[in-house]
Amino acid sequence: MTVQESSSRRRIEDLMRENEDRLVDRWVEISNAPLRGRVVDSDVRRELRDLLRALLRSSESPDGGADLRGLLADLSRTRARQGFTPGETALAVFTLKEAVYELVEADGGEEVLHGYISLSRTIDELGLYTFEAYTAAREKIIADQTEQLLELSTPVVKLWDGIVAVPLVGTLDSARTQVVMEKLLQTLVDTGSEYAVIDITGVPAVDTQVAQHLLKTVMAARLMGAHCIISGIRPQIAHTIVTLGIEFGDIVTKATLADALAFALRQSGVEVVNRRRTRVSVRAEEA
Amino acid sequence: MDRVPILKIGDVLLVSIQGDLDDQSVLTLQEDLAERVVATGAVGVIIDITAVEIVDSFVGRMLSTIAGMSRMLDAETIVVGMRPAVAITLVELGLSLGGLRTALDLEKGIALLGRTASAPLDDLSAVGQ
């Protein structure tokens, strides 16, 4: 920054400091116009005033920029969470130019105009910084959600004494299979269950890789001394499996979860009796 | 650990492996076990690996070898108490341990042996009388 530049920059910053309230009012007005009432005016006013003060401070002290960047990152994070687009977020910074220009126009001095060019360059940098902060915030949100999804999507449920089931929903990849496998095997140990039903009704497609993952899980459960049943195989999936030539070997497969449960109950020696028929006959006698 | 103790309960030999095995004690165990099966005329061998946390392909093959050996001597081998991590490791190593029977814990292992082995034995003792 040359001497002339820094003096003209100081001039415009003095101008901004003098007209702070007016400037903030105008800035809030311009930046909120395209958001159509999705934000609260008083919140934005506080945010933008803090930003403006940090901006004016940043040229005075060498480490003032850190404060400003922190405020911008906060702004981007909150807006990313509230579902604003990156454009709308950056616009909050860029609209400062318009508000300042009105001041410059009113002043009319040439030096102020030079300062405006310099300030405009700084604002561009800040705007780009909000873009970066916004993207980083969004990526973090996505990463968190992926992790939550992984935890949510693998429940192991107990169907009966000694029979547990894992309803799989969504596409199976290596990472998810690993989580499912570990959780299922741990549940087998914890509950002492001898039968495990893997229900793939919610799996949209089965290819050789998914089949391989399933086979591994079944093998591991077998090594621990449990029997695995795969259920919920839809007609198209059965067709795909046969067409691909995947061998399920001696693994028990059933069409529905109910069939698998009935099979596991039968194998573990539980008898299920339909009692409704007797009730009907009692009623018939009463009549 | 130098020697793994082999316990006899009725017709069944119980081998409880405490801790991780080195290669030499694996070989010693195989020899000891073969001798004991012959000496006692056991019909079943239960290997309890609840305490084993780390396996390699050598230990995996040991289980298969013991199972094969016992079958030759007319005794059935059941491995009980395998930990999830161990099971995953064995599958990742590509060892499916075909022909080896497994149970979740010692109790279920004994029950499994009882289901398969006791019936013909009773018949034999009936013939003897």
Image (cartoon, rainbow, N blue to C red):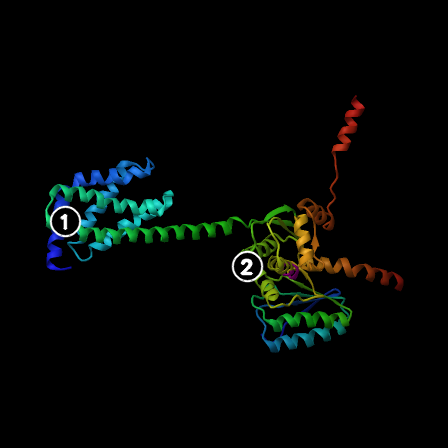
Q: Residue furthest top?
A: A287
- Residue in the foreground of this view, choosing between A248 and A187: A248
Q: Chain of mark 2?
A: A
- In the picture, the disc for residue B29 is none
The quarter of the image holding the N terminus of chain A is bottom left
- Residue in the foreground of this view, choosing between A80 and A99: A99
Q: Residue B81 appears at what percent x and percent y? A: 63, 61
Q: Identify the residue shown where x is 39% and y is 50%.
A: A138
Disc 2 marks which amino acid? Answer: Ser
Q: Identify the residue shown where x is 29% and y is 37%.
A: A33
Quadrant in the rendering for residue B36: bottom right
Q: Is residue A221 magenta?
A: yes
Whether residues under marks 2 and 1 lie with C-beta atoms below 8 angstroms apart, the answer is no
Question: Which residue in the protein does label 1 denote?
Answer: A113
Q: Chain of mark 1?
A: A
Using the image, determine if residue B3 lies above or below residue A76.
Answer: below
Question: Which residue in the protein does label 2 denote?
Answer: A174
**Mark 2: secondary structure:** helix
Quadrant in the rendering for residue B55: bottom right
Q: Nearer the viewer, mark 2 or mark 1?
A: 1
The count of marks equals 2
Using the image, determine if residue A62 lies above or below residue B94.
Answer: above
Q: Which residues are magenta?
A: A219-223
Mark 1 packing: few (<14 Cα in 10 Å), some, or many (20+)?
some
B42 left or right of A67 in image = right
Mark 2 packing: few (<14 Cα in 10 Å), some, or many (20+)?
few
Q: Residue A230 appears at what percent x and percent y? A: 66, 52
Q: Residue A122 appears at what percent x and percent y? A: 22, 53
Disc 1 marks which amino acid? Answer: Leu
